Amino acid sequence: MKPESAELVKNLEQSLEGLVKIYRLLLTVVRNEKDILIASQLDELAQNNKTKEAALMKARESEEVRRKIAFQLAESEYLDPETTRLLDFSRHFGGEVGERFRKLHSVLDLLMRRVREHNQYNEGLVSSALNTITGAMDNLRDNISGTKTYKKSGTVKNDPAESGQLVRKEV
């Protein structure tokens, strides 16, 4: 490793550790979102979404900083800055530095996979709830609106009126 690269390696490690913290927070937020969705707590869901959005913004900012540092490190080590990945750095440096980069890579990969899985599950919960609500609203609309008076041809329909009960009195 070149002497000028040592500071960049240190900065890259700190940046990656910061990303790990952010993704751990994001994983916690997404896990909490599942519980909130199941309990149908809209106020807590709104607060959780704000926290989630803030964590995503932090992750984007940290990722941009990490990219700049990685670009500078690749240039200083005469590697292709456009295609060099974290595992490429670990192979290039080897030893203790390479091992730390490999560990950080595997931790980040695992965290992102878990966040993605939980987020997809939560998306399924929301989709299911929306389908249920849409079906209930369609059913209510059909029961309230009754039958149409005119056919498409413009003639009057002579269907008997449907009777239904929206509310029933129990004794």
Image (cartoon, rainbow, N blue to C red):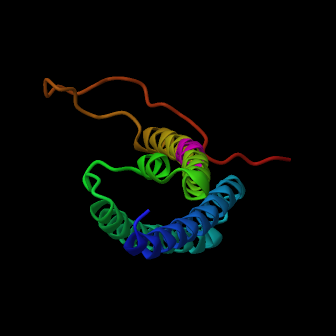
- Give the image location of residue 91, x and y in percent: 47, 46
Based on the picture, tell me whether residue 122 belongs to the magenta stretch.
yes
Residue drawn at (51%, 43%), measured in percent from left and top? Answer: 127
Which image quarter holds the N terminus?
bottom left
Name the chief secondary structure element in magenta: helix
102 horizontally vs 60: left or right: right
Residue 73 visible in the picture? yes
Quarter location, residue 5: bottom left
Magenta extent: 115-124
Q: Nearer the viewer, residue 164 or 103?
A: 103
- Give the image location of residue 111, x and y in percent: 60, 52
149 horizontally vs 9: left or right: left
Q: Is residue 160 above or below residue 36?
A: above
Q: Is residue 40 above or below residue 118?
A: below
- Give the image location of residue 47, x and y in percent: 58, 74
Q: Nearer the viewer, residue 74 or 38?
A: 74
Q: Is residue 126 above or below residue 164?
A: below
Quarter location, residue 63: bottom left
- Give the image location of residue 120, x and y in percent: 53, 43
56 horizontally vs 155: left or right: right
Based on the picture, tell me whether residue 117 belongs to the magenta stretch.
yes
Quarter location, residue 132: top right
Residue drawn at (69%, 52%), measured in percent from left and top? Answer: 38
